[in-house]
Each structure stands twice: as structure tokens, then as C-alpha cells.
Amino acid sequence: LLYLQNQTVLARGFDPRSLTLTGEPVPIASDVARFPPGFHASFWSSASGNLLAYRTDASDKPRLTWLYPDGKRQPISGTEDFFRHVRVARDASRAAVELADTAGNLDVWLLDFARGVKTRQTFDPKPDRGPALSWNAQELAFSSLRTGVWQIFRKDVNSGRPEQQLTTGPEHKILSDFSRDGRYLLFIQIGTT
């Protein structure tokens, strides 16, 4: 279990059967920022626990870094990009991220760690944000303001086909994540129901 306490990311064992914490907390990253300030901790981890990305108060750019079980850290991004929302694939081969273009518009990109490349996935002039990857990293879902209301879209990352709008209606929908089996999407609906 990873959590933030006094701007330090702590790792602690968790027993899912008894729903109890085990062992003592171990600090793994310090001076972690909250983004926006005071809202939520600016760190993300892969499902395998081998990758931790975080933003420090001393930096205005997150550093993507492999964090190994022995505590060794290895920077992976090699770029000055400002990654805002990082979702690592289960196999840790790639990540979906939010990245602003030169005009400041948010788009969704994929980072391929093995090849060291990033590929833009959305091109709409309206913001696209909050990406999530399916369990096999073949589908991407995200929230977009392209209809004037935040709606959920999905895209097959290999086919080149255009995005498919999944939700409609006057309420804003902010994507959270795919279900473990990839069959469902969890999102937050803001407004009247």
C-alpha cells in the first residue's frame, strides 16, 4: 500500500484477507507535491509496484523513475515534458499520460518504455485528460471536453481508428479506471442524476 504522509510517500504491507496493515511504513519518496496544491498527492505507481512517478515541490516537472524493490532508482523519461496524469500498463511496458501541446491544450499520449518514444493519441483542439489503459494495454479511455461537456471516449491504440464516444448527457463524466477484466469503466459523474 502506498500513501502520502507529510509529503513523504510511504509503503506498507497490506493483507487483503483481513484488510489490515502489516509491518512498519517505509519511506520511498520525499518532498512529494500535491496537485493542485492541497488537493491530492502527485504520485502514481504501476500495478506491479516496479514504477513510481511523482512530482516534488522543488520541481515543476514530474520525474518518471523505476523504483526497484531494493530501493534502486532509475530515471526513465529522459525528457523535460510535464506529465500530469500517469497510468502505467500492468506489464509496465508503457504508460498513458496527459501532456499539454505547445498551445497548452491537454492531450493523451502513450510512452513506450522499451523504445523510449512517446506517441500522441488524441488531436482534438479541446482538452483530453485522465487516460486509463485496459488490462492488456490495447485500449485507451479518457475524458474529453470536445462536446462542451466532459464525456468518456475510448480508442484502440493499434488500429488507428478514431475515438468512440461512450457517454452522453448534460453531466460531466470524469474517468477513473478500467475494471480489472477490462469489461467496465469506472467514472465520476458530476451534476444532477
Image: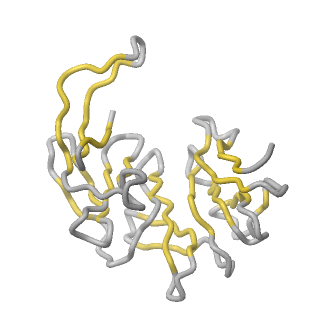
Q: How is the image coloured?
A: secondary structure
Image point (59%, 47%), residue name? 176
Depth order, front residue of 8/11: 8
Image coordinates of residue 115 in percent, x first then y, are: 39, 69
Indicate whether 72 appears above or below 125: above
Depth order, front residue of 193/183: 193
Image point (81%, 43%), residue name? 193
Residue 116's image quarter?
A: bottom left
Depth order, front residue of 42/47: 42
Q: Is residue 82 left or right of residue 131?
A: left
Indicate whether 18 appears above or below 67: above
Image point (38%, 63%), residue name? 113
Count of numbered tags:
0
Quarter of the N terminus within the rendering: top left
- Residue furthest to the top: 18
Image point (25%, 36%), residue name? 11
Residue 135's image quarter?
A: top right
Indicate whether 107 appears above or below 138: below
Image coordinates of residue 183 in percent, x first then y, are: 70, 39
Q: Is residue 171 left or right of residue 114?
A: right
Image coordinates of residue 80 in percent, x first then y, are: 32, 78
- Residue furthest to the bottom: 103
Indicate whether 150 appears above or below 12: below
Image coordinates of residue 60 in percent, x first then y, are: 30, 72
